[in-house]
Image (spheres, helix red, strand yellow):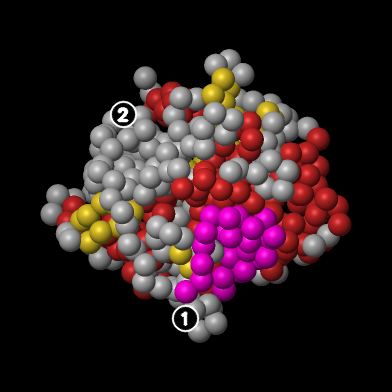
């Protein structure tokens, strides 16, 4: 089987299990013991008003390039964003990713705020996208299919109606509603959000399923452990029309891991689980009854850096200036890998969005990595849309593609690290405030 077909088969597998799978949920690794976590000390991270990142030229170049992807690789009529794009040769792929579309809507807000594009152009794109999502894109009880045709919106690959990918889309929609404050955008965004039937998704359990297909009903796998799904539960709690019960927030496990004596909440999953929900929900300076999740991501990111440094004994490219492994392309196709604990066939590949998506948590350490990649590897790792998805200097392999969700997490977290713009905008939504209150979050 060639790598393109192998990747397609893996994507189909992921589609069956949900947008972002857990290796434990697939039975590849056993679940860890669960402990009561007391990750409590307040850590606010970079202060956007004084941070040296605010005017950093590399981050400005990165965000501008990332925005170009979302502007050029979205169909202007549907607003759907391509799942990936080959930056080295012509690419006519018609596969859109609903999560990438959520990042794309957020990118339109960032782009307008940074004057990469005019307000009239960005509002027009947002309106066209929301009109298509409301009137034409196939859905089931408000939840959208994971993959769709970028031109028509029709379902691709028998993909699932995805709970977590719909949540990422909703985060982008609500960011647009708050940022543009335009009557039709407000009306459409509210209608799309209120249409989502969280009651149906949780009809037999507060632990939400990964998705649903018309052929077989609900997928058997559940979002039952700490991961990127925190935003999904919070969006359900914040709903005015079909809210999740408050007990849903307490129904999933916060499993504690330890690495070199450092304890943190995690999963058998890639680094992105510590990033995605915090792209929109601002957990700084607050905690629920279990943890301070922003501080937890600071710790987990540093642990991942240490893990990569330890791997440097085996893969000598890994160093304090070059680290970061999360789900990505590889020489042999798309791979779900990372750690600790070690997952996947790690081979020395470096994934730039691992550092890019962690900018608010470890700004100095991640900037050191991003600068090193840009300066040392140059055009082999850089494109019109920013960093390629992955590369391996040990085997001289450099990806030809960028992936929408990886471009998205890099852009959004770069902006949060620089100005907190996405956090500040999204958290003004009353649904976000209501969700945090119902989940029991308190400020320090």
Residue at horizontal 37 percent and vertical 19 percent from the top: 1
Q: Which residue is mark 2?
A: 27
| Residue that protrudes farthest toward the right in the picture | 183
Q: Quadrant of residue 298?
A: bottom left
Instruction: Decide which of 433, 122 is in the foreground and name it.
Output: 433
The answer, for residue 36, to whether it is visible in the render is yes
Residue at horizontal 83 percent and vertical 50 percent from the top: 187
Residue at horizontal 78 percent and vertical 39 percent from the top: 134
Residue 88 locus on image (x, y percent): 50, 44
Magenta span: predominant SS is helix
Q: Quadrant of residue 111?
A: bottom right
Distance in Å between CA atoms under marks 1 and 2: 44 Å
Residue 150 lies in the magenta stretch? no
| Residue that protrudes farthest toward the bottom in the picture | 50
Q: Earlier in the sequence, mark 1 or mark 2?
A: 2
Residue 440 lies in the magenta stretch? yes
Q: Which residues are magenta?
A: 419-444
Instruction: Decide which of 51, 437 is in the foreground and name it.
Output: 437
The answer, for residue 77, to whether it is visible in the render is no
Q: Secondary structure at mark 2?
A: loop
């Amino acid at each position: 089987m060639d790598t393109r077909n192998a990747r397609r088969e893996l994507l189909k597998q992921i589609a069956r299990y949900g947008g972002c799978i857990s290796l434990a949920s697939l039975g590849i690794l056993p679940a860890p013991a669960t402990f009561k976590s007391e990750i409590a000390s307040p850590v606010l991270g970079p202060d956007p008003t004084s941070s040296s990142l605010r005017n950093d030229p590399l981050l400005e170049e990165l965000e501008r390039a990332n925005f170009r992807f979302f502007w050029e690789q979205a169909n202007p009529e549907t607003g759907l964003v391509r799942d990936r794009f080959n930056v080295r040769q012509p690419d006519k792929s018609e596969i859109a990713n609903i999560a990438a579309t959520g990042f794309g809507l957020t990118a339109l807000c960032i782009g307008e705020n940074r004057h990469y594009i005019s307000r009239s152009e960005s509002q027009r794109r947002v309106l066209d996208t929301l009109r298509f999502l409301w009137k034409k894109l196939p859905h089931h009880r408000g939840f959208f299919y994971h993959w769709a045709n970028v031109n028509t919106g029709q379902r691709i690959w028998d993909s699932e109606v995805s709970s977590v990918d719909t949540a990422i889309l909703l985060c982008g929609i609500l960011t647009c509603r708050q940022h543009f404050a335009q009557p039709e955008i407000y009306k459409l965004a509210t209608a799309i959000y209120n249409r989502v039937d969280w009651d149906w998704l949780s009809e037999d359990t507060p632990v939400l399923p990964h998705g649903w297909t018309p052929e077989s009903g609900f997928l058997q796998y559940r979002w039952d452990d700490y991961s990127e799904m925190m935003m999904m539960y919070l969006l359900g709690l914040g709903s005015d029309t079909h809210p999740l019960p408050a007990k849903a927030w307490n129904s999933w496990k916060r499993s504690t891991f330890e690495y070199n004596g450092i304890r943190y909440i995690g999963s058998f999953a890639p680094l992105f689980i510590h990033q995605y929900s915090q792209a929109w929900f601002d957990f700084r300076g607050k905690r629920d009854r279990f943890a301070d999740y922003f501080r937890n991501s600071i710790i987990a990111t540093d642990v991942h850096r240490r893990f990569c440094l330890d791997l440097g004994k085996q893969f000598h490219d890994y160093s304090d200036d070059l680290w970061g492994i999360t789900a990505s392309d590889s020489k042999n196709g798309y791979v779900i890998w990372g750690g600790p604990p070690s997952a996947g066939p790690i081979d020395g590949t470096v994934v730039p969005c691992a550092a890019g998506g962690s900018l608010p948590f470890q700004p100095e350490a991640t900037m050191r990595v991003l600068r090193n990649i840009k300066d040392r590897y140059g055009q082999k790792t850089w494109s019109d849309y920013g960093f390629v998805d992955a590369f391996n200097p040990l085997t001289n392999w450099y990806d030809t593609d960028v992936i929408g969700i990886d471009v998205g997490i890099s852009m959004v977290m770069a902006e949060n690290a620089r100005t907190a713009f996405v956090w500040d905008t999204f958290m003004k939504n009353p649904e976000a405030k209501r969700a945090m209150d119902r989940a029991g979050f308190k400020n320090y």
